[in-house]
Image (tube, rainbow, N blue to C red):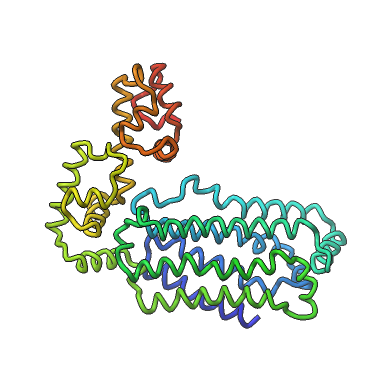
Amino acid sequence: MLIAAVGVAQSAVLLVLIIARYRNRRNLPLALILFTLAARLGSIPFWNFEDLLAHPWTMVVFSPIPFLGGPLVWWFAREATIPGPEARPPLFPLHFAPYFIEAGAVGALLLSLGPIEYQALVARIFSADPPFWIGGRNVLKLISGVVYTVLAARLVFNREWSSSVFMQDPKHRAWVKVVVLAPVGIWASFSMVALRPELAGEVAERAPLPYIVVSLAMLAVFYAVSFHILLSPEALSPRQLHERVRRELSISREQIDEVAKKVRRELERGAYRDSELSLTRLAQQLRVHPNQLSLVINDAFGENVPSLLNRYRLQHFVDEVERGALQNRTILDLAFDAGFPSKSTFNRVFKQQYGAAPSYYAAQVASGTGDADPAVG
């Protein structure tokens, strides 16, 4: 109870700090991570026979919360590494659907039970032989958390997608890695509970060690985040961090504008059609340090190198289709000619940008029903 109370109090302070002082879209997933962790930690003391019997809604609201943890960490990693609108996860609402699906299913189940049946259900949950679906949903939560944590870690440790100007700062990189990797301890400790639902039967006698370990792991995340905010508050202020990176890279505003002109000129010449073009290769062509080029592209274009190149490649593809190139060439041929390295990359980027498959758009143009706008779906 004391551990949960301390965690909730600290997270409340952090939420107020982030919302009141560091109002920024990129900080929203972090605030939600703290909020959901606090809610889950605060609900642990109520996971017992008496409280669950008196407050059925706690099972509906708090039990599915682990389904939110993974998507929020992945969202945070994207906001920290991918500048521009691409930071928002694709198919955004679907990643949080499992929470509402479980909440709705459990709520429907409880509404279908009478008082005596509900009491019998709660009694079985806190027995040595709980319902099979208790363990099943716990496993799904664990799998979801691990998958999303891996996706977040790939972003943070992938140099291509970490070309955001913020990731050029060592302190910010450390901050992002802490937030992304800290939940690993939570998921590891949660596995001891998730894979052994029969532990709930021991709650009436004492607090089983795995429950205490999970609470301590959540509390450790709170302390790691709060201490970093105290030591490096600019981590939550993109403007301050951007200016610090610019000063450390010794590049003036005039130099940023000049390099940006070179980038535009190089891309207008068709440099994007090189499927192997990367931040490093483009920097070599422009005779600029890769870190400085990353800052310039983030500052002048509001996106990173992959996003910028894909935008030019998509426009090249659309222009060719509108000129009637599909009469003699295939969609894939045009995609490769535009510089896309693979069919899967092209399909993913096109659908993410325009909301329709390339084949659907091409069919619309060929039938004369298209309106020169790829966003036809």
**Quarter of the image with the N terminus in it:** bottom right
Query: How many discs mark residues in the rendered view?
Result: 0
| Viewer-closest of 217 and 122 | 217
Residue 262 placement (x, y as % from top left)? 15, 47
In the rendered image of this protein, does residue 283 appear above or below residue 135?
above
At a point 32% along the width and 29% down the height, the residue shown is: 318
Q: Position of residue 245 (x, y in %)?
A: 25, 66
Q: Which quadrant: the C terminus? A: top left
Q: Position of residue 126 (x, y in %)?
A: 80, 69
Identify which residue is drawn at 65% across, 66% down. 191
Question: Residue 75 or 310: which is nearer the viewer?
Answer: 310
Q: Nearer the viewer, residue 102 or 179?
A: 179
Q: Is residue 220 above or below residue 129?
A: below
Q: Is residue 150 left or right of residue 262?
A: right
Describe residue 261's horizontal placement relative to residue 105 as left or right: left
Residue at image point 74% right, 59% down: 134
Q: Quadrant of residue 248?
A: bottom left
Residue 276 position within the rendered picture, expressed as x and y whole percent measured from the top left: 31, 43
Locate residue 330 relative to residue 39 in the image: left or right.
Answer: left
Eyeballing the image, is 366 above or below 352?
above
The quarter holding residue 314 reads top left
Residue extending furthest toward the bottom: 2
